[in-house]
Image (spheres, rainbow, N blue to C red):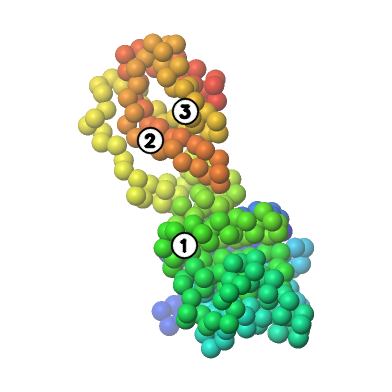
Amino acid sequence: MIRLEGVTKRFRSAAGERTALDGVDLEIAAGDVFGVVGRSGAGKSTLVRTINRLERPDAGRVFVDGQEITALDAAGLRTARRRIGMIFQHFNLLNAKTVAENVAFPLRLEGRRGGDVDRRVAELLERLGLAEHGRKHPAQLSGGQKQRVGIARALATEPKVLLCDEATSALDPETTEDILTLLDQLNRELGLTIVLITHQMEVVRRVCDRVAVMKDGRVVEQGATADVFLHPHHETTRAMLAEGEEAFDASVVPAGARLAKLTFRGAATYGPELSRVARSVGVDYSILSGRISRIRGEPYGQLTVAFTGGDAEAAVARLTERGVRVEAA
Ligand SMILES: Nc1ncnc2c1ncn2[C@@H]1O[C@H](COP(=O)(O)OP(=O)(O)OP(=O)(O)O)[C@@H](O)[C@H]1O
């Protein structure tokens, strides 16, 4: 659905030249929720803005739904943008207009008038739970409601792609969850391809099928969210995932222990595998750190354990046989 080939973007200012994107190749499949993460300044916003050509790359090509966005003239770009909606951290609503007028705005730009516009706006407000707010102004709404208006406006022209630039970063955790549930629902019900940039790893865990990690204008790691988040390779990914997690205290590790990081996925997360294996080979284990959670709905458990008092290698071999991934801790 979306393909970036060697996309490079430089910004020139009084302070000098800055390469925001440095030869980025990326492919996003139709119907995916695709996350882009990275530290501040990594190039996430610039990347997402090349998809609807709010930024024009200095080199490389961008394709959306088979069309080369980087090659379009102004009229072609106007048409293409109807198929690419976008929402923003600070909503970017027209404050002097009502909610209904905000949602109608992209339809009016297309020259649509009258009952046709009213019907479409009513349908969108209903779908987004805003039916009773149509006559209000943005200032009368909560942050979550404002973002719903942003989404309704973005969906007005029936886009195939929705770009989300830090769309939940200004919201509290409960409202963030509410908006993510909504995006998830729109992805499933409308088959909408969603590209979501965020610095919140929880957001990616919750809704993204796939994720790309950026550093200094480059994609340094990408793949299925569960693979990247459970087995990160790049230092940036590891560091971002480690934030807020407590590392175990090395002084508590029993003498002579064999440390292992165990990953259980799916139903095995809640199963008694570890205890069974320990019993069958006659080892003890201590849990040093652990987490049970979900990635895009799939349960996983990740434990760091210390095996002692027996044949730890046999325990590792048997866990591996049973589908538990064992890595050095
Ligand atoms: N319009 C611009 N003019 C000059 N420099 C820019 C412009 N837009 C972005 N940059 C620079 O390009 C680099 C990448 O910025 P970008 O906003 O894409 O990063 P980001 O990963 O989205 O970061 P953040 O999370 O802070 O928004 C940064 O160094 C930024 O200062």
- Give the quarter of the image for residue 4: bottom right
- SS at badge 2: strand
Tag 1–tag 3 contact (CB < 8 Å):
no
Work out whether residue 210 can be spotted: yes
81 relative to 253, above or below: below
Quadrant position of the C terminus in the picture: top left
**Secondary-structure class at tag 1:** helix
> What percent of the width, then of the height, locates residue 57?
62, 72
- Amino acid type at circle 3 is Val
**CA separation in Å, label 2 and label 3:** 14 Å
Q: Which residue is mark 1?
A: 175
Give the mark nearer the N terminus: 1 vs 2. 1
Measure how far apart labels 1 and 2 are at the Cα level. Answer: 27 Å
Quarter holding the N terminus?
Answer: bottom right
Q: Amino acid at mark 1?
A: Thr
Marks 1 and 3, how far apart at CA: 37 Å
Q: Total number of numbered labels?
A: 3
> Nearer the N terminus, badge 1 or badge 3?
1
Identify the residue shown where x is 43% and y is 83%.
14
Q: Looking at the rendered structure, which numbered label has been put on residue 326?
A: 3
- Ligand 1 within 8 A of label 2's CB? no
Q: Badges 2 and 3: C-beta atoms under 8 Å apart?
A: no
Residue linked to disc 2: 290
Left or right: residue 234 compared with residue 190: left
Q: Earlier in the sequence, mark 2 or mark 3?
A: 2
> Alpha-carbon neighbours of circle 3 within 10 Å: few (<14), some, or many (≥20)?
some
Q: Which mark lies nearer to you, 1 or 3?
A: 1
